[in-house]
Image (tube, rainbow, N blue to C red):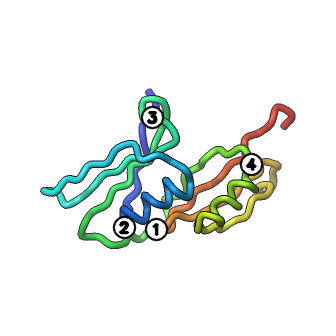
Amino acid sequence: MRILHTMIRVGNLERSLAFYTEVLGMKLLRRKDYPEGRFTLAFVGYADESEAAVLELTHNWDTPAYELGNGFGHVAVEVDDAYKACELVKARGGKVTREAGPMKHGTTVIAFVEDPDGYKIEFIQRKSGND
């Protein structure tokens, strides 16, 4: 068994696709409209779905926004350098909500960015062989 994808609902699919592909550098893997159900599914990720878990962005055509609630935490993405990743997000117009630095009570370098719908994405800096 393996995790295939995580689904999040988005209010504006084009804006979300731009964030995940242009700001975070993911690829649009597939997209399909379901006119009878009035929704679109778009799958984005860093690798093909056969190789890695991806995100499913669900856009219900008649729902412009969602309440995030307090149950969802974040999506984690491994990066080579969290400091550089934050600078790149800012340069591409994205929002950094926690600058890169060691996590509280630990040494792992993390950062948080936010997508257009308010979902948090955590950057976790890849550990070197000496960590």
Left or right: where 126 falls relative to 29: right
Q: Distance between the residues labelled 2 and 4?
A: 30 Å
Badge 1 crowding class, 10 Å Cα cut-off, few under 14, some 14 to 19, many 20 or more, is some
Q: What element carries label 4?
A: loop
Residue 8 on image: x %, y %: 41, 56
Q: How far apart are marks 3 and 1 (CA)?
A: 24 Å
Using the image, tell me which numbered label, if any, was put on residue 117: 1
The image quarter in which residue 110 lies: bottom right
Q: Identify the residue under disc 4.
A: 81
Q: Distance between the residues labelled 2 and 1?
A: 8 Å
Q: Which of marks 1 and 4 is nearer the N terminus?
A: 4
Left or right: where 29 falls relative to 80: left
Residue located 58% across and 68% down the image: 93
Residue 125 on image: x %, y %: 72, 46
Q: Identify the residue under disc 3.
A: 48
Q: Identify the residue under disc 2.
A: 12
Q: Earlier in the sequence, mark 2 or mark 3?
A: 2
Q: Earlier in the sequence, mark 3 or mark 1?
A: 3
> Do residues under tags 2 and 1 come within 8 Å of each other at their CB atoms?
yes
Residue located 56% across and 54% down the image: 24
Q: Is mark 3 on a helix, strand or loop?
A: loop
Q: What element carries label 2?
A: loop
Amino acid type of the residue that numbered disc 1 sits on in the rendered structure? Asp
Q: Which of marks 2 and 1 is nearer the N terminus?
A: 2
Total numbered badges shown on the rendered structure = 4
Nearest to the observer: residue 95 or residue 23:
23
Viewer-nearest of discs 2 and 1:
2
